[in-house]
Image: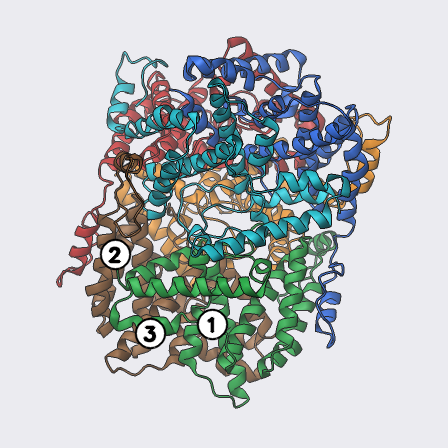
Chain colours: A brown, B orange, C red, D blue, E cyan, F green
Amino acid sequence: MGIHKYFRSLNELERIIRCPGKFKFEEHSVAAHSWKVVQYAKTLADIEEKHGVSIDWKKLYEITSSHDYGEIFIGDIKTPVKHASPQLRQLIQQVEEGMVYNFIEENIPEEFKDIFHNQLREGKDNTTEGLILEVADKMDQVYEAFAELQKGNTEKEFVKMYRQALIKIKHINLHCVDYFLNHILPDMINDEMMSSVDIRRITEEALAPDFIEDSCKPLV
Amino acid sequence: MGIHKYFRSLNELERIIRCPGKFKFEEHSVAAHSWKVVQYAKTLADIEEKHGVSIDWKKLYEITSSHDYGEIFIGDIKTPVKHASPQLRQLIQQVEEGMVYNFIEENIPEEFKDIFHNQLREGKDNTTEGLILEVADKMDQVYEAFAELQKGNTEKEFVKMYRQALIKIKHINLHCVDYFLNHILPDMINDEMMSSVDIRRITEEALAPDFIEDSCKPLV
Amino acid sequence: MGIHKYFRSLNELERIIRCPGKFKFEEHSVAAHSWKVVQYAKTLADIEEKHGVSIDWKKLYEITSSHDYGEIFIGDIKTPVKHASPQLRQLIQQVEEGMVYNFIEENIPEEFKDIFHNQLREGKDNTTEGLILEVADKMDQVYEAFAELQKGNTEKEFVKMYRQALIKIKHINLHCVDYFLNHILPDMINDEMMSSVDIRRITEEALAPDFIEDSCKPLV
Amino acid sequence: MGIHKYFRSLNELERIIRCPGKFKFEEHSVAAHSWKVVQYAKTLADIEEKHGVSIDWKKLYEITSSHDYGEIFIGDIKTPVKHASPQLRQLIQQVEEGMVYNFIEENIPEEFKDIFHNQLREGKDNTTEGLILEVADKMDQVYEAFAELQKGNTEKEFVKMYRQALIKIKHINLHCVDYFLNHILPDMINDEMMSSVDIRRITEEALAPDFIEDSCKPLV
Amino acid sequence: MGIHKYFRSLNELERIIRCPGKFKFEEHSVAAHSWKVVQYAKTLADIEEKHGVSIDWKKLYEITSSHDYGEIFIGDIKTPVKHASPQLRQLIQQVEEGMVYNFIEENIPEEFKDIFHNQLREGKDNTTEGLILEVADKMDQVYEAFAELQKGNTEKEFVKMYRQALIKIKHINLHCVDYFLNHILPDMINDEMMSSVDIRRITEEALAPDFIEDSCKPLV
Amino acid sequence: MGIHKYFRSLNELERIIRCPGKFKFEEHSVAAHSWKVVQYAKTLADIEEKHGVSIDWKKLYEITSSHDYGEIFIGDIKTPVKHASPQLRQLIQQVEEGMVYNFIEENIPEEFKDIFHNQLREGKDNTTEGLILEVADKMDQVYEAFAELQKGNTEKEFVKMYRQALIKIKHINLHCVDYFLNHILPDMINDEMMSSVDIRRITEEALAPDFIEDSCKPLV
């Protein structure tokens, strides 16, 4: 039916919710996740460039923005299943790739087939761009899990997700990983430490006769 | 950790939404679906009993109420994936059964292990109870898809789901299938035929000086 | 209109939310609640059987799965109203039973009327099955209220619901009540005790150079 | 505990959804409904004033804004139940009034008790203000039901709600009822008549080389 | 098109959610907010009357119920934007007033134009009614922010909203402000202090052999 | 506070819903919209490249992914407001740019300031990349509005949005615009034409004794 069929299908990723089954205070669609991965990857690549690494921006663009497109066909198969056996993992990946392949063959006009086959390939290879995608994808797990834990979510799943994402990231050898571990992660943790709120004190301060709201002083 | 772990986990099936990705006017959780299957199966079994077939109610109870419990471990793997290759289908079923098996071994106290292994086995065998479960499960697909089509949902997925469920049902040889096809399905279709509403006429009727609401006359 | 009318109406119980008005982190439909009651009752009856009590599984099946069907007609009338006066309580029950009765008379075909009148009767009598239903129904209140309190819900309603359900359960004389009080409830409480999460420590552990994710060690 | 307890409780009416159980495209809370009734009543009273009728605005203010407050205590008891028998209806009203009475006695400071008893009384009496409240309340049923029917909702409940509200309104003898029937209702019906959209035509028009968006021409 | 167009548009304020973007445990529509402001204002005016101040109830009715109607045209423009520069603030207010003006001129019948222009004017002037509206509006910010903080929301926005609303209120010179600061606010704070729940203790108490639920004793 | 503050803030765009106030069958967050714009722009740029136009992929990456970031600060100011007067429009844009500027100055580390100022600038200039962003942004309005109209949404807003987006697109002089108008848009319209479903026929076909599901034949 043409490229319209592809564009129309993007809508489905707005309706697939990550981490189905587990209680969460905030739900995230695969579409919103994909967009945040695009954003993280942009900054991670900027950091690499500052260290003199050269980036293929077109490649980075296509692998980050499309990296979860296959979920339209296979849904959200939980990580433990994917990893239950090397054989199963490989088969599921084969099926996913086969379905993406068939989708392109059946729907995309001849002249665009190569572009789409390239764009929708598995992007997490060992190039700088592939590794940045892996870091950015895991960073979003860190952010999602952190936000749940910070709100008091007691599902062990989020402790696990947070921990495994950090472990994965720390083993990737990129300048931007150093930056994440040394600058971004500490800010995130400190954020948490300041988050408890003493309502009584805030009330008393606000009602003090001479209190003037000062946008420069810390709020909590 | 004991049976508490099992009871607590049921909550997850309230959060897994059927048919993820597709637009729908109404969402259905796996928990609500399971309950409706229990209800349909009860009546289907009643119909069999009326025809002199004897029912093992304990077996019917356990296989219908638990029939989708495995989705806690494998999530909602889309039907096309499950059927992409006989080999994949078999592997996925092996993994699902393995995960249920491990859950029981790790969490359920020794004295209850047999009960849970029995209860959480695949129930769709060729016994009357297994076939009733298959019919009831497909009937809920018919009801879900019908309600979407009736509201004007244009996702082809629901035409497909409706059609495939009917085809599956019609090939099962049970008294209750005859009853469904000859009495329940025609009522459903007629329901649809009566559903368009002429607001102007209703308004004029209601405002007529001598109009008296009469609960016996047809409403639309 | 036939049994279709009954099956179609089940859908309404997916849309009636328990405990309306109160703030809650998780909403539960009457349909999902009914399904969990079916599941609890299954295990409670298994426990009775292990102690040599004989169970009428067909009866248990029908009274548990249909026990809140009347809410389709009367909505969710809050407990304090139901109990405001013995006279009112009795009248409301009469109305509910009258409406169920009329629904069956008007919609269910002659040959099935007895089955439906039997299935939709009030099930909480003093038989083993009736008492199991009462325990299972109250157990779901315990689970629902506990999950809210654990997440920090400060609505007093849930303290009350939790307390009253426990009191009701402890006064019922069944083997499965002993099991619940001695094995399931303690696991639930201990669950709660372990639920606070130290994000900073988890982060430091995960980043330690020699840390290896070990699925056997406790997660929190 | 004081007036705070009353103010805090208003929040519950944001969470009670009207017409529970029935499928609807849009949900309306009792709080939002109450606000719209306040708005309709304002204009209805303006119309009466234009015809020389004098309005007690303080009374109108208190009876319209608080008219469904009792639902906090009794929840949403469905209309058929309320009217199942005159005896039941009277009893339920007694219970509701008793619970409101007790709430005031237990929570509202002595000096404000009279004000709250007055404000939370049943407002639908035969005064102009009481009748305006009745019209405004029914008008919101007309608007809610109309919006569902217009979107293609096939639940007969909304045909019934629409019809019964119109019948109730037409029998009330006020100038503003004439205005509603002769000016507002016809606009509503005409709205509906114009609502079908021809996407192909709109597309072709928009793409015509000389098409200029003109905010004055009709859009559909 | 007439007054129908105005009544129909009220529906939009049920769909505009306050404080967009920020994480919140509970969402509030502008419609529900408007209704609560109507309720607070009623009691605040009652307090003024008790102190001998005379209230124009018709004016209070119209300015409180319609005070956020303009958001239909301008959406929810965030406070920092509105106040970014005095020039911008004034321009935005001009635009909002212009759009309300045009709406009335284009849609409201000649005979009602004055009434609507009056009703939809900016109501927060320096009259008693205008000041009561300002207090009631800020009180709802206090209630909304408090409820988030109490549930553990760590968004600094709600600390800010809570603090700024209190500061605004304390500078308004009305009898009802004294009452709010001396009676209502302390009850709210004390509410918070009692809100932590000890699940283990409640469980043990409930299971004690001689425990009887006593509705008079404090629940937490 | 560093780049963490920027990454954390992306979350807010998952909670800002486009087109607030209007009834819609499907809600779209600004985050999901941004991701779809990234996807459309990728293909549009591919089409330009096929025609020999050279693309600055890094620039396209940053302007498309960040193009609505400013909505975090100014919320969703409705289009009619933005365009009410050239003076207001310019002022609002100044405020938005000022707030983004301040955010960067206050939060982003010195060494990254230039990168962020560049990334978060207004991207819709007259370069190929800027024009592609404009087309992609309007294409998403076409898709959003079309999906509402197709489901029977009668809000005139969506007719307007659809029409204005098409008009805007047709006046942009790019190869990809030709492709969109000649290939993608016609597929979209044809999609609509086929969308009505005849449930009775589908049922009869499915129940025909010799019916075999054939994935190649058209479904509706």
- Going by the numbered disc 1, the residue's amino acid type is Gly
Badge 3 sits on which subunit? F
Q: In this view, does B120 lie above or below A124?
A: above
- Going by the numbered disc 3, the residue's amino acid type is Ile
Q: How crowded is mark 2: few (under 14 residues within 10 Å), some or many (20 or more)?
A: some
Q: What element carries label 3?
A: helix
Q: Is residue D63 above or below residue D151?
A: above
Q: Distance between the residues labelled 1 and 2?
A: 40 Å
Which residue was labeled with disc 2? Answer: A188
Which residue was labeled with disc 3? Answer: F115
Displayed quadrant of residue F114: bottom left
Please tell me which of labels 1 and 2 falls first in the chain. 1
Q: In this view, does A86 lie above or below A214?
A: below
Q: In this view, does F69 lie to the left or right of F104?
A: right
Q: Which of marks 1 and 3 is in front?
A: 3
Q: Residues within 10 Å of mark 3 (few under 14, many from 20)?
A: some
- Going by the numbered disc 2, the residue's amino acid type is Met
Q: Which is more toward the observer, F154 or B30?
A: F154
Q: How crowded is mark 1: few (under 14 residues within 10 Å), some or many (20 or more)?
A: some
Find residue C173 and report its horizontal and vertical position in percent.
Answer: 35, 16
Q: Is residue E4 left or right of residue F50?
A: right
Which residue was labeled with disc 1? Answer: A98
